[in-house]
Amino acid sequence: MLTKLFGKQSKLPNDLVIDPSNIPNHIGIIMDGNGRWAKRRGMPRNMGHRAGADVLKKIVVAADEIGVKALTVYGFSTENWKRPEDEVSLLMSLIKEYLSKNVQEMHKKNVRIRFIGYILGLSEELQHIIRDSEELTANNTGLTLQLAINYGGRDEIIRTVRSMVEQVQQGVITTDEITEDYFGAQLFTKEFSDVDLLIRPSKDYRISNFLLWQLAYAEFWFTDLHWPDFTKETLLEAVYAYQQRERRFGGLQEE
């Protein structure tokens, strides 16, 4: 059972201990395997997507409890438009349903909700729901949940480059002012431009055009579990694995 970390240590089922002073600031999750989870159980794919949405709610709460500052999850990629029309329609409906059912509860838990991706490419109804969700939770100071909808890492970088070219042309900035920090601050993720830990379920070992800039020095953690089987304890296992690694950021370990 997940324990809140109010200056205490939290134990995993196998007696491994989480260090509350070394919690990843920003976690990214590619929520994969919903369809495969459903197929294995003889269910339609939509049941897998619904189960995945239920898991997300639990993981948001768990991440907030252990002190994670930002959780960015891959909800719908720019490439997902290639899927069958009925599945795309279902995914969009699930996003609306998830927000309608959970935004008020997330607001009460002090969670700030943000959306990253090309939001203008979505339906007007969904854009309206997204704006309302962001406005309602804008002043919350707990975990920031960033939902990547109609998002692609390459698309994000291209849009950022175009924006900075316009800024230079308009005299807002000079080319000398374009630094890594400035570039990161122009991305959809803004203040959370660096990911500390990337979690990828479902036996896939690729990043699938997710947070390409932000993952430069992230630690990767993979699991065979499909996303609907992901639990609070799974999150703790990923955090524990992260804490066992030496993050040098290109440097050498101090002797």
Image (cartoon, rainbow, N blue to C red):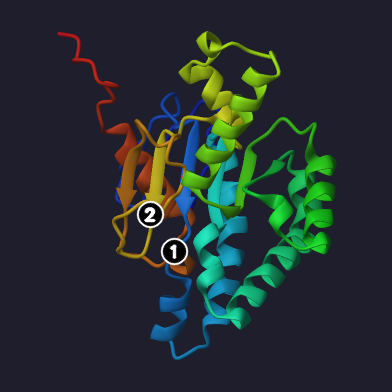
Residue 39 in the image, given as x and y percentages of width and height: 43, 85
Nearest the eye: 146 or 88: 88
* Residue 69 visible in the snapshot: no
Placement of 170 over or under 233, stated as above or below: above
Residues at marks 2 and 1 touching, judged by CB atoms closer than 8 Å: yes
| In-front residue for pair 35/81 | 81
Q: Which residue is mark 2?
A: 200
Question: How dense is the environment of label 1, judged by Cα within 10 Å: few (below 14), some, or many (20 and up)?
Answer: many
Residue 163: where, in percent of width, then height?
63, 31
| Among the two numbered marks 2 and 1 on one chain, the one whose residue lies closer to the N terminus | 1
Disc 2 crowd, CA 10 A, few/some/many (<14, 14-19, 20+): many
Alpha-carbon span between mark 2 and mark 1: 7 Å
Q: Residue at (45%, 61%) from the top-left corner? A: 230
Residue 110, numbered circle = none
Please state the horizontal and vertical placement of residue 174, each as a whole percent of the image: 59, 11
Say whether residue 73 is visible: yes
Can you tell which mark lies on residue 32?
1
**Disc 2 residue type?**
Arg
Q: Is residue 226 above or below residue 169?
A: below
Point 36% across, 32% down: residue: 216
Callout 2: SS = strand
Number of numbered discs present?
Answer: 2
In the image, what residue occupies the spot 40% across and 44% down? 198
Above or below, 117 relative to 19: below
104 or 220: nearer the viewer: 220
For mark 1, give the secondary structure. Answer: loop
> Where residue 252 sits in the image (x, y, percent)?
19, 15
Q: Is residue 122 left or right of residue 211?
A: right
Q: Outermost residue toward the front?
A: 169
Q: Which residue is most to the left?
A: 255
